[in-house]
Amino acid sequence: MSNFEDLKIWTNSRVIVNQIYRMMENHKDFGFRDQIQRAAVSIMNNIAEGKESGSDKIFIRYLVIAKGSCAEVKSMLYLCEDLGICNTEEADKLRELIENQIHAIQKFISYLKG
């Protein structure tokens, strides 16, 4: 794989970002909206930036950061649910996507470590 766009973990992140943006598009708490959107974008961008670093060691560091951003989004989804921004079903679906992403990133980290 020569491009970050070829990585399944990157394309999965893109799906997550788009779903977060759609969910938050009419939310008026701009600080909250900005935080969850930036955390979601961070997943995708850290995968891309790490892939382009040219080093597996550096790439792994970026993947660990991406996993942390996944956890941040997952945590904020509980608040979205608590605050009525989304319903339980929506939050559960997104949390499942994010949990799958965390596992996929970890699997890729293990692969890179050899």
Image: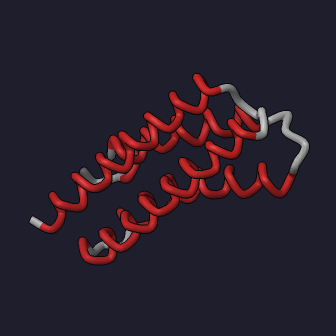
Tell me the quadrant of the picture where the C terminus can be found: bottom left
What's the residue at 71%, 30% (across, down)? 86
> Residue 92's spot in the image, x, y percent?
53, 30
Taking the view exactly as shown, the residue that stands out farthest to the front is 82
> Residue 64's spot in the image, x, y percent?
37, 67
Taking the view exactly as shown, the residue that stands out farthest to the top is 89
- Relative height, residue 69 to residue 21 (above, below): below
What's the residue at 59%, 32% (across, down)? 91
> Residue 53's spot in the image, x, y percent?
37, 72
- Relative height, residue 84 to residue 102 (above, below): above
Along the viewing direction, whichever of 75 and 30 lies nearer the viewer: 75
Taking the view exactly as shown, the residue that stands out farthest to the right is 28
> Residue 32's spot in the image, x, y percent?
78, 53
Q: Please state if 44 lies on the left or on the right of 104 as rendered.
A: right
Q: Please state if 34 lies on the left or on the right of 19 as rendered.
A: right
What is the quadrant of residue 66 in the picture?
bottom left
What is the quadrant of residue 111 in the picture?
bottom left
What is the quadrant of residue 82 in the picture?
top right
